[in-house]
Amino acid sequence: MLKKLFPGRISWWEVIIFAVATALMTAAFLISPIFENTSFQRMGVYLETWIFFAVLIMANCQKPLESALKTFVFFLISQPLIYLFQVPFSAMGWGLFSYYGRWFVMTLCTFPMAFVGWYITKKNWLSLLILSPVLVFLAYTALDAARFTASHFPRLLVTALFCLGQIVLYLWAFTSKPLQKAVGLVIPLAVAAVVLLRTPQAGVDCAVFFPDDPVFSETATVTEDNDSLTLAIDPRDDGAMLRVHATAYGDTDFTVTDGGATYDYTLQIRLDDGGSVTVNVVKR
């Protein structure tokens, strides 16, 4: 299996085809209702699958610069295509590209990260050190998904198993000594468990439209009184959006001030019995 995943070479044509194929698959998961609120839909929002794709490319390159270039081009092609493929099927249309900004920043980061990441192929303690942030992230995601699965089985079971499988795969493929494998498994899981226990269970990061499609100016401000919540206005010509980052569920009243006018709203962040999070803005 390792020889099939990491044959040690990947051509530019394979990188381009891989980028288009993964973008098409991701868009299909996001568009099709059958994948709503599943581990597959997470592919269009979270990083665990894209880490796997990046490692596949890095480990099949011969030099650090080749790794950096091919990984960067893979993300440069795949990420905008995901939005492009969704445009005909989305009510937001071309407005979907408003979400591309953070993925573009991450795409720029892939160049230096993949340059350094190529050295995991050396299979030594340096490999484990380079892998450690990824292992901690995957361990955290696996444990967090498993915690969610325990309450809403079988939701996110695939995510938990996929992340845990990546940890095992990378330790098996990119470390050579039993001690390295043991350290690479135990420490990330322990760190992730500690962080998870100290982190609120809710983790909402999204953007939602205001009711009645108001158009706010660039100077519009939000006032709210909730330490677990961060709100910001995203003014748009076709109706403003509210960017939400929250660490707790519940309803919060807030006010938008734009010039001399004020607008009162309530933000509703709720978790239903099926484990789905809904975020809505209603007018007061």
Image (spheres, helix red, strand yellow):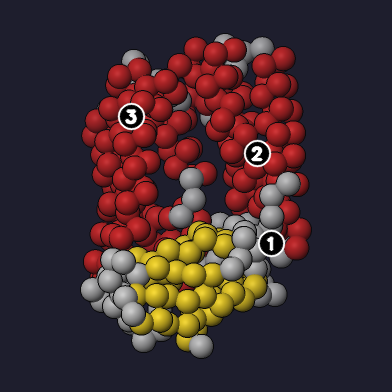
The residue singled out by tag 3 in the image is 111
The residue singled out by tag 2 in the image is 139
Dot 1: what SS? loop
> What label does residue 154 carry, if any?
1
**Measured Cα–Cα span from mark 2 to mark 3:** 24 Å
- Name the residue: 76% across, 58% down: 150
Q: Residue 215 at what x, y percent from top left?
A: 29, 78
- Name the residue: 70% across, 75% down: 273
**Measured Cα–Cα span from mark 1 to mark 3:** 36 Å
* Relative to 196, residue 119 above or below: above
Q: Residue 258 appears in which quarter of the rendering?
A: bottom left
* Relative to 149, residue 11 above or below: above
Residue type at mark 2: give it: Ala
Dot 3: what SS? helix
Residue 255 located left or right of residue 77 = right
Q: Nearer the viewer, residue 214 or 29?
A: 214
Residue 98 located left or right of residue 276 = left
Look at the image and tell me whether residue 235 can be seen: yes
Q: Nearer the viewer, residue 14 or 91?
A: 91
Q: Nearer the viewer, residue 157 or 263?
A: 263
Q: Residue 132 at what x, y percent from top left?
A: 59, 26
Residue type at mark 1: give it: Pro
Verify CB contact (< 8 Å) between mark 2 and mark 3.
no
Judged by depth in the image, the label closer to the viewer, 1 or 2, is: 2
